[in-house]
Image (cartoon, helix red, strand yellow):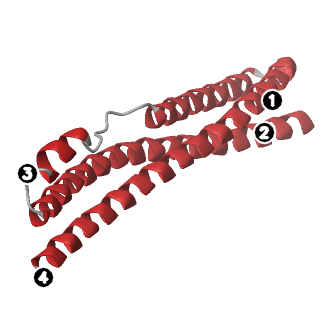
Amino acid sequence: MADDKYKILYEYQKAQFDDENNRFSKIEDKATKLLTALSFFIPLFILISTKIFERIDSFNCLFYWTITFIITLILFSASSAWWAILRSICLMDSKRMPTKKIREELFNKNSLDTCYVELSELYSDMVGVYRRLNADKNEFIGLAYNEILFAAGFFLLLVILTFVLLVI
């Protein structure tokens, strides 16, 4: 009966660890998708900005500085998003479950109940580590998302403003 109680505790902690590990992978996947989207956006932005600057001599001084300011905002925002994405993808210090030590010290010298309790404590510690890592990664992904949204909004404004100025 006691074996079952400790086994359930062990299985619960292992399930929590697996959940946090899956969240870690999903966050990595989101970061990769955002990086891909940003990698498509940057060349498009550079191409359109180049075309705008080729025709910018036809604008008056106020519009020239407005467009230059918007392009600068987009560039800084995209750079900030890129930085945040790369920070979220970078390798972070994470623990691994000990293997040799567990086998030699835990299983050979202790009862099954003690093994379940020790392993559940190890999984609990690992869950804490992964939760901290996931929180850090989520913070960077949220920052990158907001920066991309900001850049995309101003990019749309830039395109509309340029179109209006060229038509008028």
CB under 8 Å between discs 2 and 3: no
Residue 120, quarter of picture: bottom left
Going from N to C along the chain, the mark reached first, 1 or 2, is: 1
CB under 8 Å between discs 3 and 4: no
Front in this rendered view, residue 145 or 153: 145
Of circles 2 and 4, the one toward us is 4
Going from N to C along the chain, the mark reached first, 4 or 1, is: 4
**Which residue matches tag 3?**
109
In the rendering, at what x and y percent does residue 76 appear?
56, 27
Of circles 2 and 3, the one toward us is 3
Alpha carbons under labels 1 and 3: distance apart: 69 Å
In the rendering, at what x and y percent does residue 29 appear?
55, 47
**Which residue matches tag 4?**
1
**Amino acid type, mark 4:** Met
**Amino acid type, mark 1:** Ile
Which residue shows up at 14% across the image and 59% down it? 115
CB under 8 Å between discs 1 and 2: yes
**Which residue matches tag 1?**
48
**Amino acid type, mark 3:** Lys
